[in-house]
Amino acid sequence: MTTAPSLAPGDTIGILGSGQLGRMLAMAAARLGIRCIIYAPESGPACDVAADTIIAAYEDEAALADFAARVRRVTYEFENVPAATAAFLASRLPVHPNPKALAQTQDRATEKTFLNGIGIPTAPFAEVNDVASLTSALKTLGYPAVLKTRRFGYDGKGQVMVKEGMDLAQAFAAVGSVPCVLEGFVPFLREVSVVGARAETGAFAAFDVCENVHENHILARTVVPAAMGEETATKALEMASRIARALDYVGVISVEMFLVGSGEDEHLVVNEIAPRVHNSGHWTLDGAATSQFEQHIRAICGFPLGSTRRHGRVVMQNLIGDDIHSWRELMAERGACLHLYGKHEARPGRKMGHVTRIFPE
Ligand code: AMP
């Protein structure tokens, strides 16, 4: 990895993607005096708060070259940036996280193989490319099992629970008959995540472990700290640090884990890595000394990482679809910290904003 000279306030960086994560990154950057140019195929919530926007396809090399010439670092707010786009930009200027880390986390099979290779447990898994390999994978992994597309899955999309007696051809068709992994079912008690940042110097700073509650496969609430043993929490942070180091990572990384067993038997199984800021870290905007967004900007600009100190027990609630209509009551609620993403249409399942509440410990 090239270690380029650190940036200074007044410099400009580029963000690939125009969603709410890009918006919150651009707002955090502005606070540090850093300007952002958003590059995306379509306009979105990030464009309203950035210095400039380039609307072009990820394959448009002329537009990418123009973007690269106008910024000093490139980062992204979503992990499905085409590998060729990241490589094209990385040949011109530093791209954080690096394209190799991006590639390793874009594919569930590659990601799990990488994790197991550095001694981090995942669900047992097998690659599935057709109904025959699904049938043989089920013989090893047993029922129930979770069939997931290798790429482009999010919020429960591109996955199906395979139960005994199910028509396997139908299950494979349900995920689009594309390359998949089959995962053994993990009987978890809770879902947790670690959001941490690695600097160019190799320094690593993580926020406390978050506990995540999903509804309809979408994150509904994050509670910090997660209910788990202290030793297990330390292990969770150590795992995230080990992953970031092994990927030669710069920026915020998020690691989703399953908490399994209790007491002596309590342990962690990594579900997936998000090579970016994460919804389960939104609480840090109001509940920590430095937000995950500011931390990411600090890391990619070569600035010192900020303190991850928490201000209390924190509960972050996503506002999904019609939840947004209670914005007026939430604004009136004392102590509720409301964040709205400026999206015009409240479709079901669409993340419209979030609200954070902080309680004394
Ligand atoms: P993912 O898209 O991998 O984040 O999975 C979405 C959700 O499905 C997770 O948040 C879990 O609730 C559930 N899930 C995924 N994989 C497994 C597994 N191997 N065992 C049990 N539940 C799972």
Image (cartoon, rainbow, N blue to C red):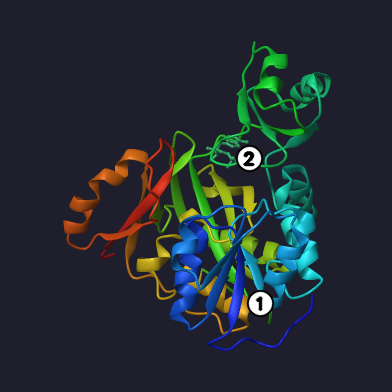
From the viewer's perspective, tell me whether residue 25 is left or right of residue 310.
right
Vertical placement of residue 54 versus 261, above or below:
below
State the image coordinates of residue 90 (x, y, percent, origin top left).
Answer: 77, 69
Q: Establish whether ligand 1 lies closer than 8 Å to the Cβ of label 1.
A: no
State the image coordinates of residue 343 (x, y, percent, origin top left).
Answer: 40, 50
- The local secondary structure at tag 1 comes to helix
Residue placed at 38% from the left, 55% from the top?
342
Q: Which quadrant of the render holds ligand 1?
A: top right
Disc 1 crowd rating (10 Å Cα; few below 14, some 14-19, many 20+) is some
Q: Nearer the viewer, residue 228 or 117?
A: 117
Say which mark, if any, is on residue 202.
none
Q: Establish whether ligand 1 lies closer than 8 Å to the Cβ of label 2.
A: yes
Quadrant (top left, top right, bottom left, bottom right) of the N terminus: bottom right
Vertical placement of residue 4 versus 226, above or below:
below
Quadrant (top left, top right, bottom left, bottom right) of the C terminus: bottom left
For residue 193, say whether it is visible: yes
Image depth: mark 1 or mark 2 in front: 1
Residue placed at 40% from the left, 61% from the top?
283
The span from disc 1 to disc 2 (Cα, nearest Å) is 32 Å
State the image coordinates of residue 317 (x, y, percent, origin top left).
Answer: 35, 50
Q: Which residue is mark 2?
A: 153
Say which mark, if any, is on residue 70.
1
Vertical placement of residue 175 versus 115, above or below:
above
